[in-house]
Amino acid sequence: MKHKTLFNLVEKLGPSLIKLLMGTLRIKEYDKHNLISAKETHGTVIYTFWHNRMLIPAYTHRDQLIHVLISQHRDGEYIASVVKQLGFGTIRGSSRRGGMKALKKAFIISKNFDIALTPDGPTGPKEIVKDGALYLAYRTGKPIIPTVFLIKSRWELHSWDNFMIPKPFSQVKMIYGKPIFVRSKSEIPEKRDELQKALKNL
């Protein structure tokens, strides 16, 4: 009963609260040419960003029918219910549950829609890239766009990822990194390091 009540509250209030808070932020985009050129050449892209910063793209990239890989855990159920109302598609699965099925679905969807995922989700370790995004990039031929959100003033929760909630009117820098391509399966370890550095150092 508690889970159902909480789910209903999140589903009803989540999107409105996100829009209310995020609408106060001073968000500036940097290096958007990296994204524009990748989309012009390849049609669709794979956005990657850290799990603890997902509130920002939930607002800035709403209503674009980007499809988000979301875990089948209970927390994922809450997230999926909110992002659907913000104009995202959802693909359910993670490295532990339904991962291969989710990647196969993402492979098909990526032909027409951008994909977004958190390479350290759904349970960490915090800010450590796992192979899901890289394998998807290899299978689809689509570029990974490392996307960094620098939040000047924020609260951090006591969760595995220290989930970040921007304080009202905070400054936020949204930085698009250079596209990362995975041409062969053997490149995955090298490209994992490249993505790790991009998300840490941008």
Image: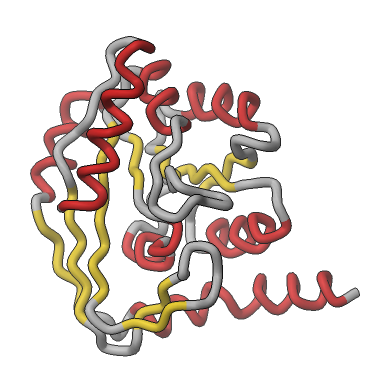
User: Which residue shows up at 51% across the image and 49% down it?
Assistant: 121
- Quarter of the rendering containing residue 5: bottom right
15 sits left or right of 63 in the view: right
As drawn, the residue found furthest toward the right would be 1
As drawn, the residue found furthest toward the bottom would be 168
**How many discs mark residues in the rendered view?**
0
User: Which residue shows up at 18% across the image and 42% down it?
Assistant: 35
**Horizontal and vertical percent position of residue 201:** 17, 52
79 sits left or right of 138 in the view: right
User: Which residue shows up at 17% across the image and 30% down it?
Assistant: 40
76 sits left or right of 201 in the view: right
**Horizontal and vertical percent position of residue 88:** 49, 52
Viewer-side residue, 63 vs 147: 147
**Horizontal and vertical percent position of residue 42:** 24, 24
Residue 199 vs 62, above or below: the answer is: above
- Quarter of the rendering containing residue 93: top right
**Horizontal and vertical percent position of residue 114:** 38, 38
Q: Quadrant of the N terminus?
A: bottom right
Viewer-side residue, 111 vs 149: 149
Here the colouring is secondary structure
User: Which residue shows up at 42% across the image and 67% down it?
Assistant: 55
Viewer-side residue, 157 vs 22: 157
Residue 180 vs 72, above or below: the answer is: above
